Image: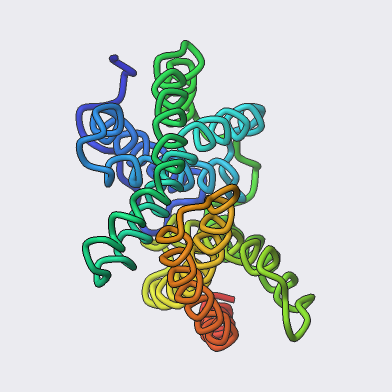
Amino acid sequence: MDLGLPPEPVTARRKDPPAVHVRVRLDSQLRALLAHEAGTKSGVDPEDLHQMRVTIRRLRAAVNADGAGLGDVVSPLQVELKWLGNALGRVRDIDVQLDRLRAEAAGFDDEERAAVERLLGGLVAERKAARRRMLAALRTKRYTALLTSLAAATASAPQTTSDSADRVVDNAVVSVIYRPYRKLFKAVAAMGDDPVDEQLHALRIKGKRLRYAAELVGPAGKEPVKQLIKATKAFQEVLGEHQDAAVAEETIRRLLQGQDDAAVIFVAGRLVEREHARRLAYRSQWRDRWDAVAAFAAEFNRKTG
């Protein structure tokens, strides 16, 4: 489908205002979305689906960035990007769980691995159903309309104020990163000593939003932003491992419901024990990773403020 994108990716100068950097980001991520679409549909390499889902998150961050200058299309684009992310998300989530649990069982003997596959049979069936729904979504007019809207937003003229260019440029980096950082900071500050898993998962999502916002203005922010991206990625990865372990443990327990195969019950117990230990190990690390994010954010504000 010809969306009217220019032959070459659009670029921005370091001192261009946020609206220009947003359009560069929309252009690059729309191209990435299209590049991974065929692979996502074929299912040959699960990485295509993973990258397509990541691209959707980056598009959402760009659309929602301060200074984007996209006007009234922001809300509809967010709704439609969320819809597409949800359409792809279940298949990807199940892929992660299957890969994780099979990797955990790699050291089991042949009979135990066979029992693990019997345990995972229900999850495999869930994936097939989720994939059918995903492929149906990618064939809809709604999906085509979203691609068209993204292309139009990429090519649109920024809706800017009458502020001087220098003033906009000086505040560009801070304005884009400040809001997601403040949301993350407030969420961490509100945490107790022993937050529940759902709270840590919410932190992970906020961490992703900060990271994608920082990536958006990376060329403008130079080294301070690069360090912030690196620290935020480490923070996000620790919380991601914690979440994956928590979900895996919950999934195993769910798959065990009504199970009377003794071998399956045995291997499930071994897997639950491992995931529980891993969840606790990563839970103990997240505050140290947060301290690094806060430190780099403070340094970033000092150098750009």
Q: What's the image's color scheme?
A: rainbow
Residue 175 is left or right of residue 7, and the answer is: right
Q: Quadrant of residue 131?
A: top left
Residue 104 is left or right of residue 180, and the answer is: left
Across the whole image, how many numbered discs are drawn on residues? 0
User: Vertical placement of 97 versus 60: above or below?
Assistant: below
| Quadrant location of the N terminus in the rendered image | top left
From this viewpoint, is residue 304 visible? yes
Residue 25 is left or right of residue 181, and the answer is: left
List x then y, in percent, for residue 121.
Answer: 40, 43
Given residues 91 and 265, the one toward you in this image is 265
Residue drawn at the location 43% of the way across and 58% of the way down: 264
**The furthest residue to the top:** 141
Q: Quadrant of residue 72?
A: top right
List x then y, in percent, for residue 235.
Answer: 50, 75
User: Vertical placement of 141 versus 125: above or below?
Assistant: above
Residue 201 is left or right of residue 129, and the answer is: right
From this viewpoint, is residue 170 visible? no
List x then y, in percent, for residue 217.
Answer: 45, 59
Given residues 208 and 39, the one toward you in this image is 39
User: Vertical placement of 97 versus 240: above or below?
Assistant: above
Residue drawn at the location 47% of the way across and 24% of the way down: 133
List x then y, in percent, for residue 249.
Answer: 54, 64
| Quadrant location of the C terminus in the rendered image | bottom right
Residue drawn at the location 78% of the way across and 81% of the way down: 192
